[in-house]
Image: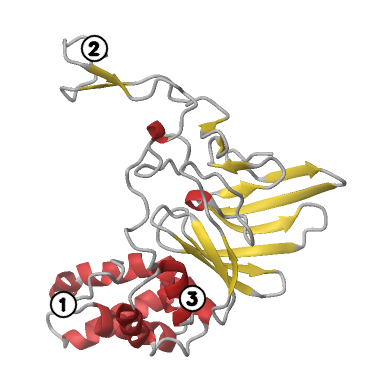
Amino acid sequence: MYDPFHRQAQKDATITSTSKTRFIYSGWQRIADYDGVSGVLQNRYIYGARLDEPLIQVSTAGVLTFLHANHQGSVLAVTDSVGAVINKNSYGPFGEGVPIGTTFGYTGQRYDSESGLYYYKRRYYDSANGRFLQPDPVGYQIEEACGCSCSGGCGTDAKPSQLNLYSYVLNDSLNNSDPKGLQVSTQVAPQTPLRVGLGLNLATSVWATIFDLELAALIELKRRWKRVHDLEVSRLASWFGNCMKDAVNRHKTSMEELRKQYKDCEFDEAFKEQKEKIDEQFKKDKRYCNDVVDIYEEEFLTPDPVPWLPNF
């Protein structure tokens, strides 16, 4: 069953018995699963700043599991709250393989265990064959060597963007992605597995095992985040995932505006008020939000940032 925005609202599956799962969204992000019959919450999800960047899965009992992805956004490992690896996943070039421990798998998409397909929002994807099940709704398009859209009329060498309407990302799955099943994008996840969820209290050995990072880099990472480890994990991840990119960037770009607006008073007071606005908008406790902003400024807005750290 689908809603008016073409999002799958409910899944009915019959294997030995019939089950119904209802999906709740925020935009295109699936934020919760409910039992479609009893209405009981099954799982909640916390995301990073980008589409299809799941970071934390929260069960109906409140148990947190953390998802770790590669540069494509594919979930490689699932860990518990103390950093112990629960499951590891591996994929072929086109996503072959079955994710374990979570419904998020190849490129961060939802894996449907009953059908063995991935839900790419507007189309379903069969990773075993590297093909979508539905044709591209846009149809055939022509890309010209001259950069125009003349469909071959200008005499230059025409290159069809895709001859097979069922193909996946022009058969270049290592460099491209298609998060909505509508358009090939070269913008995959950052070229580092260390993303928004870095503040989570994970053991050094977990990162070393999964991502084979240098020990010096891990020590530096832990040093930078030691001040936020005491904050509640779910609040920290939720705050960073939902407002770090927006609120902090807005704070950074509005300094000149604030200086003009508050030219007759101390700038520190203006900045304090800006923090209060952020707190009010995201309904976070002022002490918590201000502490995180202060730590972010002190540790990450430095003249010489560590090159492998994430660019929020």
Label 3, label 2: how many angstroms apart (C-alpha)?
Answer: 53 Å
* Rendered location of residue 17, percent (x, y): 87, 47
Badge 3: residue crowd in 10 Å (few <14, some 14–19, many ≥20): some
Give the percent coordinates (x, y) of residue 232. Answer: 52, 84
In the picture, which quadrant includes the N terminus?
Answer: top right
Q: Is residue 257 visible?
A: yes
Q: Kindly check if marks 1 and 3 are in contact, taking CB atoms under 8 A apart as contact.
A: no
Quadrant of residue 224 in the image?
Answer: bottom left
Residue under the image location 50 percent in, 46 percent down: 92
Q: Are marks 1 and 2 in contact (CB under 8 Å)?
A: no
Foreground disc of the pair 1, 3: 3
Q: Amino acid at mark 3?
A: Val
Identify residue type, mark 2.
Gly
Residue denoted by label 2: 152
Mark 3: secondary structure = helix
Task: Tell me which label, 3 or 2, sits earlier in the chain.
Answer: 2
CA distance for labels 1 and 2: 49 Å
Q: Which mark is residue 304?
A: 1
Q: Position of residue 4 (x, y in %)?
A: 59, 38
Specify the amino acid type for callout 1. Asp
Q: Which numbered disc, 3 or 2, marks the residue closer to the eye?
A: 3
* Residue closest to the far right: 17
Q: Which residue matches tag 3?
A: 206
- Using the image as rendered, state which of residue 77 and residue 255 is in the foreground: 77
User: Which residue is painted at 78% across and 58% down in the image?
Assistant: 39
Say whether disc 1 or disc 2 marks the residue closer to the N-terminus: 2
Numbered circle sitting on residue 125: none
* Camera-nearest residue between 113 and 26: 113
